[in-house]
Amino acid sequence: MHEDLPLADGVCLCLVVNPPQAQPAHGWQLVRELSPNGPLGRIWSLSRPLTYRSIDALESSGLIHRDRSDSNSRRHALTPTATGRRAADRWLDEPVNHIRDLRTGFLIKYELRRRLGRDPARFARQQATHLAGAFTALDDPNVDVNDIVSLWRRHNALAAQRVLAALAAETEQLTELR
């Protein structure tokens, strides 16, 4: 039912499950995290209205609960439901399905995993394995240089492979130093 969370909903859900500051999370905290100048906004930003739209969708889906006990307050605490916690874990463990989604979906999941102490190197290797078929399909050294789309896709795939390999190797080396 919740396996295919949109990126905005998945990120917001993970931030409710694992709030950036004190428990429980609030919408304004998510907005701050995802603003262009926020800690996660550098990777992928989400406007205030879209952040609150995701919060509303997560609440409607039964993945989070908004505490409305203080009707005088405009700031309602956000808490995950048990279903929401499971959905966040599943979403965070799913690799992205397209090379084009590495810049957003993969990097935001990688950073959230890093923050939570989950093995980001393993996730980078899992992502590379998941896209191995796409990488192989695009690795044609004889691509026609006049076919700029195929040339772009090939070099984009090669760069993505190098980044994934570097993330896997770099985090392994950092882990060994601890």
Image: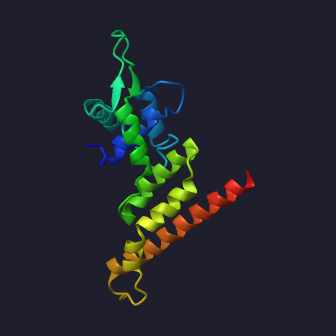
| Depicted 26 relative to depicted 143: above or below | above
Q: Nearer the viewer, residue 129 or 45?
A: 129
Splitting the image into 4 quarters, where does residue 96 fall?
bottom left
Q: Give the residue displayed 49% in from the left and 48% down from the top.
A: 42
Q: Give the residue displayed 42% in from the left and 81% down from the top.
A: 139
| Depicted 18 relative to depicted 107: above or below | above
Picture coordinates of residue 173 (x, y %)?
68, 60
Q: Give the residue displayed 39% in from the left and 39% down from the top.
A: 86
Picture coordinates of residue 78 (x, y %)?
40, 25
Q: In which quadrant will I find the N terminus?
A: top left
Picture coordinates of residue 62 (x, y %)?
29, 31
Residue 12 seen in the figure: no
| Depicted 82 relative to depicted 133: above or below | above
| Depicted 159 relative to depicted 104: above or below | below
Q: Give the residue displayed 40% in from the left and 90% down from the top.
A: 142
Picture coordinates of residue 87 (x, y %)?
37, 41
Number of marks in the rendered image: 0
Residue 1 seen in the figure: yes
